[in-house]
Amino acid sequence: MLRVVVCVSGGGTNLQAILDAIDKKEITNTEIIAVISNNAGAKALTRAENHGICAICMSPKSFSDRAAFNRAFTEKMCELNPDLIVLAGFLVRIPEDMVKKFSNRIVNIHPSLIPSFCGVGYYGLKVHEKVLERGVKVTGATVHFVNEGMDEGPIIAQKAVYIEDDDTPEVLQKRVMEQAEWILLPKAIDDIANGRIEVVNDKVRKTEKSEIKVQR
Ligand code: GAR
């Protein structure tokens, strides 16, 4: 059984997609052991509690400085000792020490086709604002392993989403979630839980049985 900790900052719709997929047995061999948020008001914490999952709030604001938060956050994670950490809309930079300790065991969902519209300053609705500002015609979402860089780790899966002429950032965000994020992230977790993914030379290889080999 893959023991997973999900980290969230806000609404938690990706967390909900994971919980629903576990309930429907679309994700197998997986147990969410805790949900951690940096934001006490995150709806995601309520979603976790409603599911009987341990919900933990750890905000950088309650620590004297970022280094103290990073230490406490990493210690908490080591205590929970998950097989996989899922960043499902978690807007806090993962401490370097945690990345090292959980190498190729942290995955992130990003609401664009990396390497476009990612890196510092690209998160949540801001990504979709920049996409519309630039006038690109296709965007999407990416699930990737987390390394020391920002949105730079090995890519597990991507799915394209078309932009419509009258899109607003909010409308586009919802379409990217519905058509890409809520599908890709559960499939990636299921693949990891069932040993269908490996990282070779910093690239993700999927086996024949992978659920996300072709995403259209
Ligand atoms: C999602 O769109 C996710 O891709 C994005 O935040 C949103 C969280 O929504 N993550 C990032 O921008 C990370 N760089 P949710 O809380 O409803 O799942």
Image (cartoon, rainbow, N blue to C red):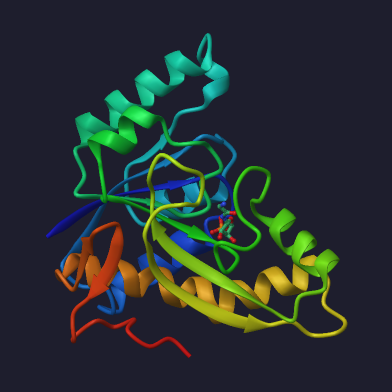
Residue occupying the point 53% across, 9% down: 64
Residue at point 41% right, 55% down? 50
Judge by depth and name the residue closer to the eye, 158 or 2: 158
Image quadrant in which you'd find residue 128:
bottom right
Instruction: Look at the image and tell me in which quarter the N terminus lies.
Output: bottom left
Residue sitting at x 15%, y 71%: 194
Q: Which residue reaches farthest front?
A: 201
> Foreground: 81 or 146?
146
Q: Residue furthest right?
A: 166
In the picture provided, is 127 more to the left or to the right than 72?
Answer: right
Q: Position of residue 168 (x, y in %)?
A: 83, 71
- Which residue, as the protein is rendered here, is positioned at the far top? 64
Given residues 66 and 197, the one toward you in this image is 197
| Quarter holding residue 101 | top left
Ligand 1's quadrant: bottom right
The location of residue 176, given as percent across then percent down, is 62, 74
**Residue 77 x, y percent position in the rendering:** 28, 33
Against 62, residue 48 (above or below) is below
Left or right? Give the position of 107 relative to 27: right
Q: In this rendering, is residue 158 above or below 151?
A: below
* Residue 48 in picture, x, y percent from top left: 40, 51
Which residue shows up at 38% across the image and 49% down it?
146
Relative to 114, is 127 on the left or the right?
right
Among the 4 quarters of the image, the one containing residue 41 = top right
Give the camera-side residue of 83 and 35.
83
